[in-house]
Image (cartoon, grey):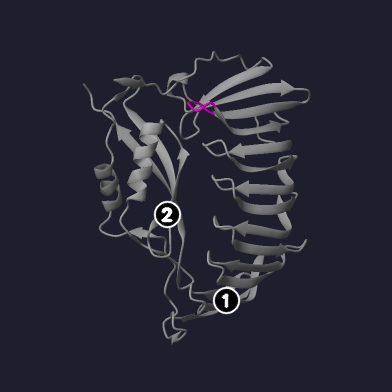
Amino acid sequence: MKTVSLFLLLITPVSLGAQKVEQFYDWQWQRCEPANARFITILEKKDALWERKDYFLRERRLHRSGFFTDTFFKVQQGNCFYYHPNGVPSSHGNYFNGQKEGLWLSFYPDGSMSDSAVFTGGRVTGTRFTYHKNGFLSDSIIYNPDGSGVEVSWFEDGSPSSAGRYGPGRRKQGKWQYFHRNGKLSALEVYEDNRLLSKQHYNEEGHHLSDSLKPDRPAMFMGMKGDWQRYLQKQLYFPSRYKIVNGDQAVVVVNGVIDEEGKMTAVEVHTPFHPQFDQIAVMAMKNSPKWMPAISHNRRVKFSIRQTITFHQQSD
């Protein structure tokens, strides 16, 4: 039988008064004892700044690296890098006095770009592009210095999803249009200073609907309340060849996307535990039955979820 320790790297903490500090965090990023750690943070004084490096403990891979001006590690300064559990960069850019400044790029776990934006004083300025995983544009937003601007978005196949304008302060202004996947108008909404004045809904054939009160909703697992958790518990099992020697449960956090048809897609580990457990958690998510798709502006849209999956070890 293989044993799995929640803490796989023996490191002795250093006092806070020293030039190097080591701290341990659990899967929820709460400070913890080394035996329960999933992440380790190494803080080191370098000239006038503190360098912070967060590691996925078991994988011994970087999760984040950056610099801070204060001993509370709240005000970031200079270049900062974030990483997915597989080691691929998730985003990187620059901070100035704790706010994002200049070009920031973000990436999917496969390395393809997901976002490109320029920041000034922590706010996006100019043109921002976001991308679907297939490389098609998802959103194009142009912001003026006063926060006014234009936004256009597309579905994965390149068909239009929405279009509208912002007034100063990034408040919706004037006519906003939303579309079904087939290109037909789904909703026409009119705003004044971010206040909705009127809206009209249309079905997928383009016909006007007399009822425009259909509310937005998140994706929902079909069945009764609690059926999703019951489904997960039926799919999960504790690997017989493994034993946790310093705890009685293992937690894996998994991301997923429910598409417009209600299928679970884009399943990725967000916070790993151990490859054997991670794989079981991912398969449980991938094998999910269909969901009721999310509704936004009278059309079906993708919906992202982050699921905590807990494995319980039976007592001997």
Q: Secondary structure at mark 2?
A: strand
The quadrant of the picture occupied by the N terminus is top left
Q: Is residue 125 above or below residue 42?
A: below
In magenta stretch: residue 277: no
Instruction: Measure the alpha-carbon separation of dots 1 and 2.
Output: 27 Å
Residue 8 on image: x %, y %: 45, 20
Q: Name the residue rendered at 59%, 67% in the picture.
A: 153
Q: Name the residue rendered at 33%, 45% in the picture.
A: 284
Residue 231 on image: x %, y %: 27, 48
**What amino acid does circle 1 point to?**
Gln
Residue 256 on image: x %, y %: 43, 50
Q: What's the magenta region?
A: 56-60
**What amino acid does circle 2 point to?**
Thr
| Residue with the mark numbered 2 | 265
| Residue with the mark numbered 1 | 177
Q: Main secondary structure of the magenta part?
A: loop
Residue 213 on image: x %, y %: 43, 76
